[in-house]
Amino acid sequence: MKTMVISDLDGTLLHSDARLSEFTVQAINSVIARGVNFTYATARSLNSSLTLTKRLALNLPVITYNGACIKQPSTGEIIEIQSLDEAQVALIAETLHRYGIHPLVYTFLDGEEKVLWVRGAESEGMLHYLDSREGDERMLPVDSFDDLFCGEVFYVTCIEDEQETLLPVRDILMGSDSLNCILQREIYRPEYWLEIMDYRVSKAHAIDDLMRLTGMEKIIAFGDSINDAPLFEVADECYAVENAVDALKRVADDVIESNDEDGVAKWLMENCNRLI
C-alpha cells in the first residue's frame, strides 16, 4: 500500500524559532532517499515555506494556503487551486468594509500571484508580516479599499491585535455557508489571524486531491493546531506533537515529542521501514 506522510510546518516540523533543525533536515532527506513519500501542508504560501524548506529533497507536491492551492515546490507550478467566486468576494469585501478591517488579499493578476493591501492602513501585526516579506515580488500595495479585491482572489487574511475585533466578521462569513474561516492566534507573535477561503478549502480536501493525483492509498499526518483537525479526520494515522493544542491531542492516535525536540523527524526515523 502506497503511503503518504504529510506534516504541518509551523509548530510541528519547525522549531519555535520558525526554523528547521539540522537534525530534521537530515532525517527527512534520509527517509525520502529510502523511499518514503513525504510532503507538507501549511497555511503559508509556497514562497514563504520555501525559504524554510528549500533544503528538503521533497518528492511530492505541497499543500499551501491551508489547502487552497497545491503546488510543485521545485517549479512553483500550480497543480490545483480553489478560487473565490464573485458573490463570495463581494460578501467578504462588504463585511470587512463594514467593520473597518483592512485585509491582505491573495489574488492572481494577469496570471501572476500577488498580495494586495491598503498602504497606510496596516495593523501592527500586518506591518510585521510585510517587513518579513521584504523583497517578495508578490507584495503589491494599493491606495484604497476599493482597489483590493481585483483579479482572481483565492485567499484573504486579516491580522488584528485583538481577537474580539475579528469575531463578528468570522461569525458573519461562516454563517453564509459558502466560506471557510480559521481564526487563531499567530504562533510566534501576540496578534490574531482570520483566514478566509472557499468553504471547500481545507487541508483534508487538498489531501484527497493530492492522493488522487499521486495514487497514494494511505495517509499518516502530523500537526499541532486546530486547522490540522480536518487533516486528522481523513488520515489513517495521525500524531500530535507534545506542544499541540489539547483539542488536537484528543483526536490524535498518539502524542509524540514536541516540535523543539524534533518529534516528527524522530518518529520518521523510527518507523521508516514500515513506510516504504
Image (cartoon, helix red, strand yellow):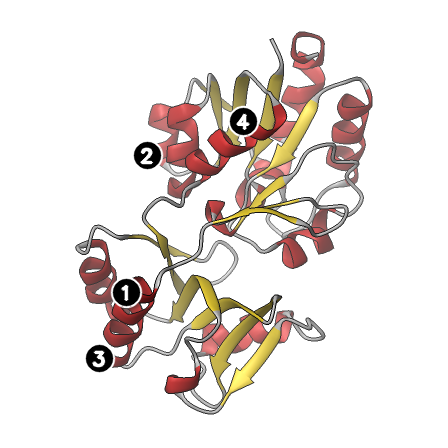
Mark 2 residue crowding within 10 angstroms, few (<14) / some (14–19) / many (20+)? few
Question: What numbered label is drawn on residue 87?
Answer: 1
Q: Nearer the viewer, mark 3 or mark 4?
A: 4
Question: What numbered label is drawn on residue 161?
Answer: none
Q: Amino acid at mark 3?
A: Arg
Q: Where in the figure is residue 39, as x and y percent of width and height?
A: 64, 34
Separation (CA) of disc 3 from disc 4: 41 Å
Residue appearing at x 55%, y 40% in the figure: 41
Residue appearing at x 35%, y 34% in the figure: 246
Q: Amino acid at mark 4?
A: Arg
Name the side, left or right, on which 124 lies relative to 27: left
What secondary structure is marked by label 4? helix
Question: What numbered label is drawn on residue 212?
Answer: 4
Q: Where in the figure is residue 260, as x and y percent of width and height?
A: 62, 39
Name the side, left or right, on which 170 lies relative to 197: left
Which comes sooner in the sequence, label 3 or label 2? 3
Separation (CA) of disc 1 from disc 3: 16 Å
Which comes sooner in the sequence, label 2 or label 4? 4
Which comes sooner in the sequence, label 4 or label 1? 1
